[in-house]
Image (tube, helix red, strand yellow):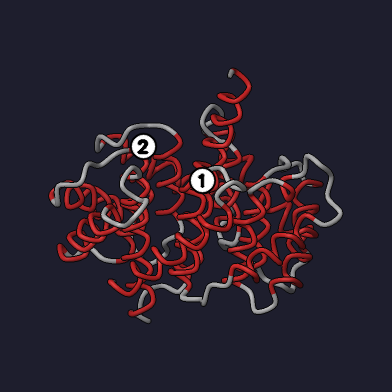
Amino acid sequence: MNDWLEQYETIFQELKKELRWKVAGDTQLMYIAGTYVMKQKPFSYEELNETAEQLKEGKGMFSTLRSNSRFTLAAVLNTTFDEPKESAEHMKQVYDALVEHKLKRGEMTYVTALTLLSTADRKMPFSEQAEAVRETYKAMQSEHPFITSEQDYPLATLLSHRSESTEEIMKRVEHFYTRLAEESFMKGNDLQFLSHILSLDTDHEAEELIRRTVDARERWKNTGLKFRRLHYPAAGMLALTSMEEGTFQEVHDTAKAIQKLQGFRWHRDWNERTAAAFVTSRMLEDDSTLHAGLYAAMDTVIQAQNAAMISSMAAASAAASSNS
């Protein structure tokens, strides 16, 4: 893990030098750096900036692709696809199809477009896939109208790939939500997000996954780390990958090591989530017996959660500026 942390710090420091005044804050740079580390792709600022500049071409002044979000989207394109420039144009086409099917314009719909590009059946027209995403999302919304938001688009995309009917999928999601609430998980969007993650698993019975998730929470806390709502998705990913005591200790040790890196001290919650993502990613990389679909799930979870956090930070920053 030390090699990953060294790469993480090096990329972050280079990004801070180049993009310090162009992004929402340090956490956006941390997300970009972490994306390259987890995908084990060589980092080039020139290539990142080139893709980011391509994204904003031909877009209006208020387009998401002219905002700082273009850098995080560019990072995902550069680390996921062999031809990022070509994939960027495909992403825009998929985005338009999603908007036509009533998904809201904005960063989350671009993240959803990237999820479709990287996970969907290319033989099926994107318009049909967009309709499946919308149907799944509307089903989520009907169950929890007050907590379902654009943040749930990407997970709706992965769930829409399942062979079961939308009704069966949502019944499974709701079972996880209800049972975990009974196990003292706090109701809300974080628990709904966790329920969506667990519903992606097809190899275990629901009650087994619930037990593993509860155990993951306790093992997380036993390391000395605090367990907050924002850690629910991490607990879900760990429950689906490894329940070894050593895994949770590695998350703890990695989080503490990140905390000591230059510029990371004041981002404890972010560092703990990143540590869990790094550890999970290494396990998926090293163990070919783990379900291949977890790669897509983890990528999507991280993108959706981080995009939501970065967007909220940007909104708070804009509000503060307008009041000053």
> Which secondary structure lies at badge 2?
helix
Where is residue 203? Give x, y as percent. Answer: 37, 67
**Quadrant housing the C terminus:** top right
Image position of 9 (left or right of 32): left
Disc number placed over residue 178 in the picture, else none: 2
> Which secondary structure lies at badge 1?
helix
Q: Earlier in the sequence, mark 1 or mark 2?
A: 1
Instruction: Give 62 or 25, whichever is nearer the viewer.
Output: 25
Taking the image as drawn, is residue 300 in sight?
no
Where is residue 18? Give x, y as percent. Answer: 57, 58
Image position of 143 (left or right of 110): left
Q: Residue at x 40, y 47 (%)?
A: 194
Residue type marked 1: Met
Instruction: Give 322 or 217, whichever is nearer the viewer.
Output: 322
Instruction: Give 264 or 268, whichever is nearer the viewer.
Output: 264
Residue 281 is drawn in which quadrant? bottom left
Residue corresponding to mark 1 = 170
Q: Residues within 10 Å of mark 1 (few under 14, many from 20)?
A: many
Residue sitting farthest toward the top: 323
Taking the image as drawn, is residue 307 in sight?
yes
